[in-house]
Each structure stands twice: as structure tokens, then as C-alpha cells.
Amino acid sequence: MLDNSVNLLPLDDLLKFGLRQEFVNKLNTYTNVCFPVQSAVLPILLNNKNGFLPPRDIVICSPTGSGKTLCYVLPILNNIRFVEDASAVYALIIAPSASLTEQIFKEFEKFNVFNAKIVALYGNTTYFHERSLLFPNNSCISQAHLIIATPGRLLDHLMDNDGNFINLSILRFLVIDEADKMQDTARIEWLDVIERLSCASIASTNNLSISSLTNNYKQNCHLQKILVSATLLLDVNKLYIWNLRCPQLFLATDKEVEEENVQEQQNVESGQMSILLPECLNHKILICDQKLKPLILFQQIKLHLSEWNKIIVFVNKKQTSYRLSYLLHKLNSSNLFKLAELSSNLHRYRLLKLIKSFRNGKIRILIACDQFSRGVDVQDVDCVINYDVPINERIFIHRAGRTARAMKGGLLLSLFTKDEKMRLKKQLSGHNLWKNVEELNNFKVEDEEAIKQYKKALAQLESECLPKTIKRTRKRILENGH
């Protein structure tokens, strides 16, 4: 068990654990100390020698924006420099969404000081172009040290019978980012395939017989799994599906002290849930009338234009996203700010273009459903707004994790009715997340002109949506007879 208070490691201290000077030099352009979770995890992973005994698997549970990604990026790239041959994959990183995969890929590229061959497979380009990246110059064996992929895209390439081969036989690292989102289906859909093709097939992950250890040592293939998440169900039955070897759990705890704490735990109780909020998050709830929510949201944005440069508004349904976007556009007739709706109807190129515009400040406000609450990596989001009550505490934590990243302050503003507030309070209290919540009760819209403009926008919205509703109803009657 680690001491509850983790000292922040100066970057130069990583040298004694084996990190190359080139990485320290690169890190120095961003920070001069490691974040708390990095201070706990990096010495363990950097100091892992591929010796006779296999390394323990790692589980990292820490808030979004706390620096979890670098906990595996640096050790993997630090070790890849010893691997000259790229005909066998050295590390494989799995992420549940294309946006998160892209984010991880960019982080690896940022620190790729030794020019490791890195390929990302997540559908941002054509399947055939991805094949050309994996198999350049008509090679029949993949030429990548490191593959970052979504599960489905990876399986497509692994199972392709075009005569080319992705060699996982000496896979050293298997990283599963946002593991909680995949734990219910991973074993059935893709984990068995990866284990069968990797060195895990040579011997069971927990097989410590002399013959098994000797065989793995000779082939230099002690596979180490690293599970990463901001919200992880610490249920022994859930963790069992990952087939972990003597796992070490690094859990960031939200103590009422200035320093964020990280603990290493070897045992977890069945059914225990670990959900973590960014320490610098400020959570406020504004009690409001359901009918006036869009107008109150608009008024709040106007009121804080000088403070909120980047805002993400989360809703539960695509229809709500469309309606809210429409109303805000109408209310914003004087063009005080630019906003965009992230919709599943958008082509991926258009989607990425909008996120890029949000990153560089051309767009101030994004309206999104929860499918975008993971993997949208934007620095310095000043405010996240809960327009609808999140359906569960995991959705809440991932919404909140879009702000207050990298130990910077951020605001989570929930626009709820009294009933919605009680629902959220009940949802969060069981996980110790209802703490220091500031409730605002007396906000009223007194601008008669704004109310008049809002009612006009509502009428326009209803008149536009009604024909579409009639068409859908007519189509359903024709198809189903009722």
C-alpha cells in the first residue's frame, strides 16, 4: 500500500527509473512535475524489466484530465526504442470510440522522439488506406511497433484473409482505455481473439509453472495488461473477465486536502464502485422552470461571456439537441457567440472540423448528446452545462470530466427543476459525489423583450417540426397500418 499522500515527482527523477533524457526534455516543454497519478504509476511501469517473472497487470482509476494517458504512453515508447524490428506488434491500445482513439494517437505522436512506427485504426480514413499503413511496400507482415484502435476496426484487420498477417506473438503491452465502457462485451467480442493471437496463448496469464515462465522468457513475451478509466466498477466478477495477473490498482481518491491522493490496492470488495470527480471542479445547480430552460441557458451564457470562452452543453436526446440548438440560434440574433450542434447525422469529416473549430476558439459553444461525452479532448473548457439529468452517475462523471482538466479549475453548471435536482442528488449521494454543491434559486428572466423573442422562436420551432411529425406519422400508418 502506497502512502496516502503522493509527492509530485520532478521530471528529472524519472531518469533514475529508466526514462530516457529525450522524453524528459520533451516533457519539460509542457510541465516541470508529474501529476499525482503519474507520480505513482510511472515509477512502477518504467521500472518493469522483462525478466524471468512476469510483471503484474495494472489498473488505473483516476479522474478525466488527471494525466492517465501519459502513464502508459511514456513507458511504452521508452521500451519500444529497444525493438528494431517492426514486423511484430509490441504494444496494442484499445479504445471504445474513434474520437478517443484519435486523441491517444496524437498523444503518442507528440512524444514519439525515437520515431516508432505507430498506426491508428479507427475509421478516419478508408479501410484500404489503413491496410497500406499496416503493410507498406507490399509487405505481407504488418510493419507497426504500436497499434491504436477501436475494437471493431481492429477485428476487421485481424480477421481479414487477404494473405497479410498482423503478428501479435510477442505483444508486450495491451492497454484498454475507458475499460469500464467495454467490460460487458470485451471477452465475447474481441479479448479472446487478441489473447489467442498474442503470447498470452503460449501460457495462461496466471500460469507460473517453471516451463511456462521459461518459454515466455525465451520468447521475451510477458504480456502486461493496463486497464485505464475514470469510472471503474471494482467488482471482482467484472475484473475477472480481463484475466489479470496479480493486478495492482492505482486509485485516485478525492480527500479533503489540497494534494490529490493516489493509493495502490491489491484487493477490492465485490460490488464496490469507484467514481472520481476532478478535484478542481466547481459544481453549481441553478433551479429553473422547465419551460424557460433554453432562455435561462441563453441568459446565463450572455451573463458570463467574459468568463466562459469554451462551453459544452450536454443533453440526453438527439431531438433535444436539435431543438436547443435551433432556439439558441434564434435567440442569438445579434451574433454574440458562435455555437454548433454535434450530431450523429454529421459526416465524420464535418464532425472533426467542428471540434477543431471549438478547440481553436472559432466556436464557443458545443451542444452534444452523451455519445460525445467521452473522447472529445479539448483543453481549457471553462464550463460544462448539464441541460438534462444524466441517466446515471457514470455519464455524470464523464460530462464533468470535460472541464477542470490537468488540475485547472472548471465549472459544472446544472440547469434543473427542483424534481430534477432531487433525482441527481439521489443518484450521486450513494457515490459520495454530492459534495460542496452550490444551489442557485433566485435567477429570474426579467427581460420582457427576451421573453417575447423566446416565445416567437418557440412558435417557429413548432411550426417547422410539425410538418415533419405529420410526415413520420403518415409514413408509419402506410407501413404498419396504424
Image (cartoon, rainbow, N blue to C red):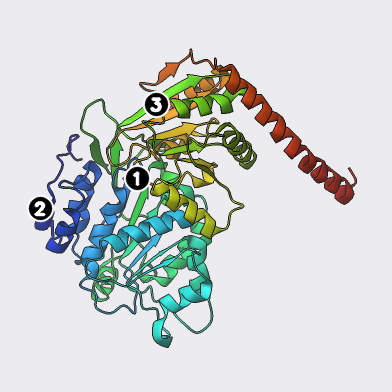
Q: Residue at x 84, y 48 (%)?
A: 475
Q: Nearer the viewer, residue 196 or 186?
A: 186
Question: Which residue is label 2 attached to?
Answer: 12
Horizontal and vertical percent position of residue 468: 77, 43
Residue sitting nearer the eye, 21 or 232: 21
Residue closest to the eye, 143 or 455: 455
Question: Which residue was labeled with disc 1?
Answer: 379
Residue 87 in which image quadrant? bottom left
Spatial separation of the CA atoms under disc 3 and disc 2: 36 Å
Judged by depth in the image, the label closer to the viewer, 3 or 1, is: 1
Decide which of tag 3 and tag 2 comes sooner along the chain: 2
Is the N terminus in the top left, top right, bottom left or bottom right quadrant?
top left
Residue 257: name its quadrant: top left
Q: Amino acid at mark 2?
A: Asp
* Residue 423 as seen in the image, left or right of residue 399: right
Q: Is residue 383 above or below residue 133?
A: above
Up-down: is 157 above or below 311? Answer: below
Question: How many labels were placed on the picture?
Answer: 3
Query: Is residue 22 rendered to the left or right of residue 174?
Result: left
- Say left or right for 6 vs 181: left
Q: Position of residue 349 (x, y in %)?
A: 52, 60
Residues under numbered marks 1 and 2 in contact, where contact means CB atoms less than 8 Å apart:
no
As helix, strand or loop, the secondary structure at mark 2 comes to helix
Distance, label 3 to label 1, CA atoms, is 19 Å
Q: What is the quadrant of the C terminus in the image?
A: top right
Q: Is residue 135 above or below residue 99?
A: below
Mark 1 or mark 2, whichever is nearer to me: 1
Q: Residue at x 54, y 17 (%)?
A: 445
